[in-house]
Amino acid sequence: MKIGLIDIDSKIPNLALMKISAYYKLLKNEVTLTSPLFADQFDRCFASKIFDYTNMPLLPIWTQLGGSGSKEDNEKKLDPHTENLMPDYSLYNCDYSIGFTSRGCNRKCPFCIVPKKEGRWTSVADICQFWDGQDRIMLLDNSMNTNNHWFEHIMNQLISKKIKVDFSQGLDIRYLNDKQAYLLSKVRLWKRIHFSWDSTKIEKQVRKGIEILHRHNVRYIMFYVLIGFNSTPEDDLYRVETLRGLGVDPFVMPYDKFDDYQRRFARWVNHKAIFKSVKWKDYGRSV
Ligand code: SF4
């Protein structure tokens, strides 16, 4: 059978498609990453759409669609057998491993679909289920440090195998403690560790978390700062200036990318040279 896989909008190799590929290759099918234009040349087609703001291409009616960005099927899951297969990294010539060690989240941020889609936090897989000896791992866990025991378990695996890690969805500063920070100081980092500061209500925890990280000399960090969702421009400025004062880089995420103020504020903060040299009161007036 000829299987066509369509990656509509992923920015990184699509994990679900790599697992579907592994499943059909095990059954000796011919699997190809293809485009919607060629979908009718295959016996079966699977498509994945990650983002809700990207365009939906025309697909044959028999295409099986999934992914968080597909309106009708954003809660569709792989069957457990396929979910547990080693991803077929050759589909994208991907030279690092990607996967989840946990799913879900115990918080309920109103702008986030994770708790609705995945439920409460739960551990799901050891790294050996998706790590194939590569020297880098991209973890997709939404809140990997929710559970101390699990965090220690995974971190000890990464440290002992000397794997460079990217916590791509960030860690939760509110759960951070000395043991976690110690482990972060020992692991090899592929990219900066990022945390989020979405509301001034958690200022105490943010300050405490940064103090713990600095105590363990973990300084390769940054904070995402969501603006435009239940926050005022004064709150936004307060959060980025507080982070600056604590010696940590903020990175602004506008909730509404088309809002003029949010776009300007994000441009000011995220352009590091400008953020260092120009005050918001001057930048905000000049553009
Ligand atoms: S902590 Fe992160 S993953 Fe959890 S609900 Fe909030 S935004 Fe979503």
Image (cartoon, rainbow, N blue to C red):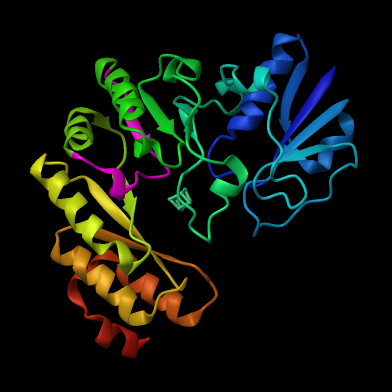
Q: Where is residue 90 in the image (x, y as percent from the top left)?
A: 58, 21
Q: Is residue 147 left or right of residue 32?
A: left
Q: In this view, does 279 lie above or below 195?
A: below
Q: Residue at x 26, y 19 (%)?
A: 162
Horizontally, is 97 left or right of 85 in the view? left
Residue extending furthest bottom? 285
Whether residue 175 appears in magenta in the rendering, the answer is: yes
Count the labels in the image. 0
Front residue of 209/16: it is 209
- The quadrant in which the N terminus is found is top right
Q: Indicate the position of residue 147 as horizontal and vertical percent values.
A: 36, 33
> Residue 174: x and y, percent?
30, 49
| Range shown magenta | 162-177
The residue lying toward the viewer, choosing from 84 and 222, is 84
Tell me, yes or no, whether the highlighted magenta stretch contains residue 77: no
Residue occupying image coordinates x 20% and y 68%: 242
Quadrant in the rendering for residue 87:
top right
Q: In which quarter of the image is the C terminus?
A: bottom left
Query: Observer-nearest residue: 204 or 246?
Result: 204
Residue in the image at 76% along x and 9% along y: 28
Residue 5, horizontal then vertical, whole percent: 73, 31
Q: In which quarter of the image is residue 48?
A: top right
In the image, 170 versus 36, the foreground residue is 170
The image shows residue 243, relative to residue 99, as above or below, that is below
